[in-house]
Amino acid sequence: MEQRKKRRDLQDRKPAVIDRLELWSSTSRNIDGLWVGTMEGRPHSGLRRIEEALQLIKNHAPLHHARVINNLQRIWVRLLPGDIAHYERSLKACVFDERYLLQEATTIEWIASTIVHEATHARLEQWGVMYEEKKRVRIEAICIRRERNFIAKLQQGEALQEEVARRLEWCAVDHDHYSDASFAQREAEGQMEMLRYLGAPDWVFGFAMKLRAVRLWAYHVVGRVRRLAQDG
């Protein structure tokens, strides 16, 4: 019963208004039934890189490709505060930060394995496995193992295999990285970096710093209350 309710909650959640507006204004194309879009300007290099990554998955791992198509509705390139990629539940989308995606050091193999990772998040949530704080380490480990399974099918995936192995080991010891407070701090810092990237004026930075301080204080207080409740 609880699992069915979680699935209904997932289906009922709607994208934010700003997300719908940005989706509408994005340059997009349909690839194997998957909406792939970008907020970047011409020549829309992100779209090309996503298309190449999807083709790589399709050529080397048809099962993973089918899971990507079945569990995601969108792959979207935009600016992300505090993250290089994530699964956005309300959009059923794998979202990439355009700054990282377009770096020369970011390989098509890495992009493809990240799509596999985020599609696994989508699949787990459709099963009712929500990305709750206490479950995040186990969920991330599952998604990283799916990446490892995919990368093993690539001819030149040794370096990526080593990276994934290191992330699995790190995942097992650094649980605080996936806490609500850590997510909030990374997002606040990422918003400042995004403002610099966009060339925001100084007064915007002052306002953003105050907002960041209030947000981090709120998460700190909520975290203390939650720990006290658990200890009690």
Image (cartoon, rainbow, N blue to C red):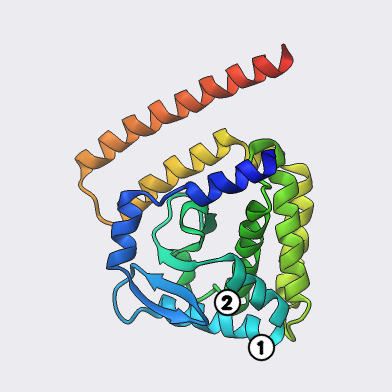
Q: Dot 2: within a 10 Å radius of its alpha carbon, few (fewer than 14), some, or many (20 or more) residues? A: some
- The residue at the point 66 percent across, 15 percent down is 229
Residue 147: in sight, yes or no? yes
- Look at mark 2 in the image and give the residue it sits on: 107
* Nearer the observer, 34 or 222: 34
Quadrant of the image containing the C terminus: top right
Location of residue 167 in the rendering, given as x and y in whole percent from the top left corner: 72, 57
Q: Name which quarter of the figure residue 182 lies in.
A: top right
- The residue at the point 76 percent across, 68 percent down is 148
Which tag, 1 or 2, sits closer to the chain's start?
1
- For residue 148, side relative to residue 39 (left or right): right
C-alpha gap between disc 1 and disc 2: 17 Å
- The residue at the point 75 percent across, 59 percent down is 166
Residue 98: in sight, yes or no? no
Location of residue 15 in the rendering, given as x and y in whole percent from the top left corner: 40, 52
* Nearer the observer, 23 or 209: 23
- For residue 173, side relative to residue 217 (left or right): right
Quadrant of the image containing the N terminus: top right
- Look at mark 1 in the image and give the residue it sits on: 59
* Nearer the observer, 26 or 182: 26
Find the residue positioned furthest to the top.
232
Which type of secondary structure does the marked residue at label 1 adopt? helix
Q: Nearest to the eye among marks 1 and 2: give it.
A: 1
